[in-house]
């Protein structure tokens, strides 16, 4: 099995060189090895959105949320990508979920308690 972290770093280097298509290809290799590699889904979602491949970008952003459902950042990223892809309702829903997760809930001093 390939070292997924090395492959991810190679994808990052390609992105840094301005080769988004190459970065996407390398990240797809990572996901072939491990479909649950969250960082690869996170990065590929951003790159695909920048390349105008909105449906596939959203698929990867949604996969991040499936893999890390309790992570507010995952919801926030989904919100940004959905907004950039013109899916405003989905963006607003994901942002609301992110904000709710980040608030700590009523038991952590939220909801107006003092």
Image (cartoon, rainbow, N blue to C red):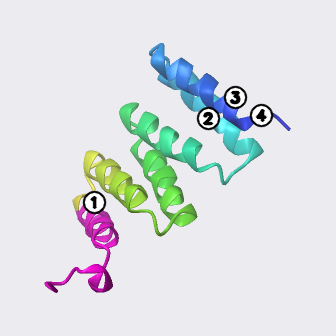
Disc 1/disc 3 C-alpha distance (Å): 32 Å
Residue drawn at point x = 61 percent, y = 35 percent:
27
For label 1, the residue is 91
**Residue 6: numbered disc:** 3
Q: Secondary structure at mark 2?
A: helix
Q: CA distance from mark 3 to mark 2?
A: 11 Å
Q: CA distance from mark 4 to mark 3?
A: 5 Å
Report the residue marked by disc 4: 3
Q: In the rendered view of the protein, which quadrant contains the N terminus?
A: top right
Please tell me which residue is depicted at 16% across the width and 86% down the height of the picture. Answer: 113
Q: Earlier in the sequence, mark 1 or mark 4?
A: 4
Image spot of residue 74 (x, y percent): 42, 57
Could you tell me residue 56's position as x and y percent?
49, 47
Contact between marks 2 and 4 (CB within 8 A): the answer is no
Front in this rendered view, residue 103 or 53? 103
Between the C-alphas of marks 1 and 4, the distance is 34 Å
Mark 2 or mark 4: name the one nearer the start of the chain: 4
> Closer to the observer: label 1 or label 4?
4
Circle 1: is it few (<14), some (14-19), or many (20+) Cα within 10 Å? many
Q: Which residue is mark 2?
A: 27
Residue span colored magenta: 89-114
Q: Is residue 77 above or below residue 15?
A: below
Along the line of sight, the residue nearer the viewer: 112 or 1: 112
Earlier residue among tags 3 and 2? 3
Q: Earlier in the sequence, mark 1 or mark 3?
A: 3
Is residue 82 shown above or below 26? below
Crowding near the residue tagged with mark 3, few <14, some 14–19, many ≥20 C-alpha atoms within 10 Å: few
Quadrant of res 93 = bottom left
């Amino acid at each position: 099995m390939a070292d997924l972290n090395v492959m991810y770093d190679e994808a990052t280097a390609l992105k840094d060189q301005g080769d988004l298509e190459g970065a996407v290809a390398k990240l797809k290799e990572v996901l072939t090895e491990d479909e649950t590699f969250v960082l690869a889904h996170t990065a590929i979602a951003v790159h695909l959105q920048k390349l105008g491949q909105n449906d596939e970008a959203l698929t990867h952003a949604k996969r991040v949320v499936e893999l890390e459902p309790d992570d507010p950042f995952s919801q926030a990223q989904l919100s940004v990508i959905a907004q950039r892809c013109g899916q405003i309702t989905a963006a607003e829903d994901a942002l609301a979920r992110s904000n709710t997760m980040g608030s700590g809930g009523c038991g952590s001093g939220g909801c107006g308690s003092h």
